[in-house]
Image: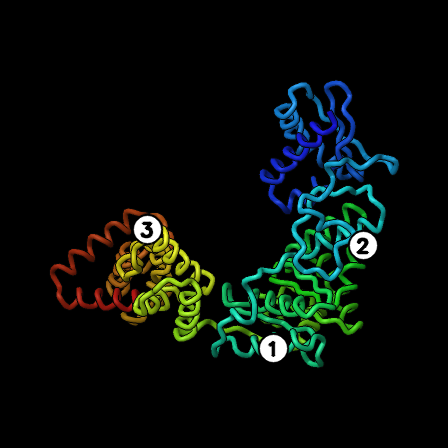
């Protein structure tokens, strides 16, 4: 019966993880230990009263339903706070083949996500579990060799190589990388971790700022903040990705600030990435912002056409699929803001070619990537239309939403409404609200009036068409 219960609990745990997600599962449910069965009741044990009460209120009914599905004879689930003498359930072992066991080296940077572990273990075991859980896996694809260097990112790349070769170099601690989404910040951070891991002898902890926050909160709830702090302050290199997610999280910022100081004072390396420079992260505490800016700050600019072509050529060559140059140029022109999305578009083309055995052409590219290409078509806003029309007819921007009815103001306003209807996906009521909370019938009248005038007045039609081309270019 014990083996049957263990297998049932493993399946239930997997179901719960799939339903609530990894983060929520690790925060609230991972520490559950399978207890004894008494008649139609199974006992699940948790380390603290707080965890027991939370799981009971949030997941109790679902756990009961899943147990009844697995073993119909079990109709009730009892949640208890475990005692020190409680034995650890066999189901509490890690599902990843031992990555969470004490034998795992503390410097391992590729620790797999933790399985169901026992909170009733000895303190040394809890420290080991905490270390394995804190360290996020590094993506094996992201290395310095696969990073395409161009003018927009060459400085950040050089700084990252320097830190990977000589951690804690004077002037490079902390290393702060910043830039827009999908420009290569995370790639460089993984590359540093991969290089340090390859050389060995250096303990590295990599995690997102969001994971840092969740693990800090979980440590408070499970009363293991000492282990949390001890682990982070014992590593040689700490890498925190997307620091902007700590904005507004005052307690987490304070903990990160103290960890930052402890590591820098001990001569350890810190690497941080964010979407803005330290001086522009206005939601961070001043003391943290100034400390982040005291090392090396390297920005990654938006990609150039040449860099995008280089990235696509390298990815295409690695895939072994022939991608015509005109297709690569087309993609580099169309997808300009996000390298990650650019690579994803190329991967989709290559997969389509492999699955259907068809060559990649410009026509097939437009067909396969129609949704991505449509999303990257220039989006015109009503505010932009109002500004262009006001400039063209030399009226004040405020006249677009004013109550003035003079023809010199009313006609440009009608043209702006017409262009808003033609160039945006906004509804008539939405357009009306942008023009001084006017009724949708006013917008309808403006659209029909402009169409009539364009048919009768060639010069007026040319003005409107010129404005359209300016807005769409």
Secondary element type, mark 3:
helix
What residue did someone put label 3 on? Answer: 356
Q: In the rendered structure, which disc, 3 or 2, sits on the residue that comes first in sequence?
A: 2
What residue did someone put label 1 on? Answer: 159
- For the C terminus, the quadrant is bottom left
Check contact, mark 2 vs mark 1: CB within 8 A: no
Q: Residue at position x 23%, y 54% from top?
A: 447
Q: Position of residue 267 (x, y in %)?
A: 77, 74
How many residues crowd mark 3 within 10 Å: few (<14), some (14–19), many (20+)?
A: few
Q: Position of residue 200 (x, y in %)?
A: 71, 68
Residue furthest to the right in view is 85
Residue 428 seen in this snapshot: yes
Task: Give the Cα separation between the discs numbered 1 and 3.
Answer: 43 Å
Task: Give the Cα separation between the discs numbered 3 and 2.
Answer: 53 Å
Q: Residue at position x 62%, y 66% from top?
A: 194
What residue did someone put label 2 on? Answer: 227
How many residues crowd mark 2 within 10 Å: few (<14), some (14–19), many (20+)?
A: some
From the viewer's perspective, is the residue at label 3 or at label 2 nearer?
3
Q: Is residue 265 left or right of residue 386?
A: right
Q: Is residue 275 left or right of residue 226?
A: left
Q: Residue at position x 82%, y 44% from top?
A: 121
Residue 389 seen in this snapshot: no
Secondary element type, mark 1:
helix
Q: Position of residue 177 (x, y in %)?
A: 59, 71
Q: Is residue 249 left or right of residue 446?
A: right
Q: Position of residue 263 (x, y in %)?
A: 77, 69
Q: In the rendered structure, which disc, 1 or 3, sits on the residue that comes first in sequence?
A: 1
């Amino acid at each position: 019966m014990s083996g049957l219960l263990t297998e049932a609990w493993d399946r239930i745990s997997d179901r719960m993880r799939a339903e609530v997600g990894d983060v929520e599962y690790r925060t609230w449910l991972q520490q559950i230990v399978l207890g004894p069965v008494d008649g139609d009741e199974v006992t699940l044990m948790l380390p603290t009263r707080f965890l027991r009460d939370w799981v009971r209120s949030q997941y109790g009914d679902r756990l009961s339903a899943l147990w009844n599905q697995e073993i119909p004879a079990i109709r009730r689930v009892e949640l208890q706070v475990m005692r020190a003498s409680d034995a650890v359930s066999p189901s509490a072992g890690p599902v990843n083949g031992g990555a969470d066991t004490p034998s795992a080296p503390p410097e391992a940077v590729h620790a797999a996500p933790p399985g169901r572990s026992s909170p009733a273990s000895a303190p040394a075991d809890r420290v080991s579990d905490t270390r394995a859980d804190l360290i996020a896996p590094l993506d094996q694809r992201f290395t310095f060799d696969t990073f395409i260097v161009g003018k927009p990112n060459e400085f950040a790349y050089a700084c990252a190589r320097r830190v990977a070769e000589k951690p804690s170099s004077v002037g490079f601690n902390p290393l702060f990388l910043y830039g827009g989404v999908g420009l290569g910040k995370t790639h460089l951070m993984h590359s540093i971790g991969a290089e340090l891991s390859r050389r060995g002898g250096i303990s590295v902890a990599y995690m997102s700022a969001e994971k840092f926050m969740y693990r800090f909160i979980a440590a408070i709830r499970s009363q293991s903040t000492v282990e949390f702090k001890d682990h982070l302050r014992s590593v040689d290199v700490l890498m925190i990705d997307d620091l902007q997610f700590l904005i507004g999280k005052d307690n987490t910022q304070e903990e990160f600030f103290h960890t930052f100081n402890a590591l820098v004072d001990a001569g350890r390396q810190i690497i941080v990435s964010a979407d803005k420079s330290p001086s522009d992260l206005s939601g961070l505490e001043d003391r943290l912002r100034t400390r982040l800016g005291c090392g090396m700050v390297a920005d990654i600019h938006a990609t150039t056409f040449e860099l995008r072509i280089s990235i696509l050529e390298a990815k295409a060559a690695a895939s072994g699929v022939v991608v015509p140059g005109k297709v690569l140029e087309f993609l580099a022109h169309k997808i300009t803001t996000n390298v990650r999305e650019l690579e994803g578009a190329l991967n989709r083309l290559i997969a389509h070619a492999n699955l259907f055995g068809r060559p990649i052409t410009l026509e097939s590219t437009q067909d396969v990537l129609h949704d991505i290409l449509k999303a990257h078509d220039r989006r015109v806003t009503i505010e932009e239309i109002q500004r262009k029309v006001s400039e063209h007819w030399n009226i004040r921007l405020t006249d677009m939403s004013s109550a003035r009815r003079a023809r010199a103001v009313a006609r440009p306003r009608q043209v702006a409404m017409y262009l808003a209807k033609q160039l945006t996906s906004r509804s008539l009521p939405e357009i009306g609200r942008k023009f001084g909370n006017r009724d949708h019938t006013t917008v309808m009248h403006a659209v029909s009036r402009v169409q009539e005038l364009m048919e009768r007045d060639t010069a007026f039609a040319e003005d409107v068409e010129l404005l359209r081309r300016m807005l769409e270019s």
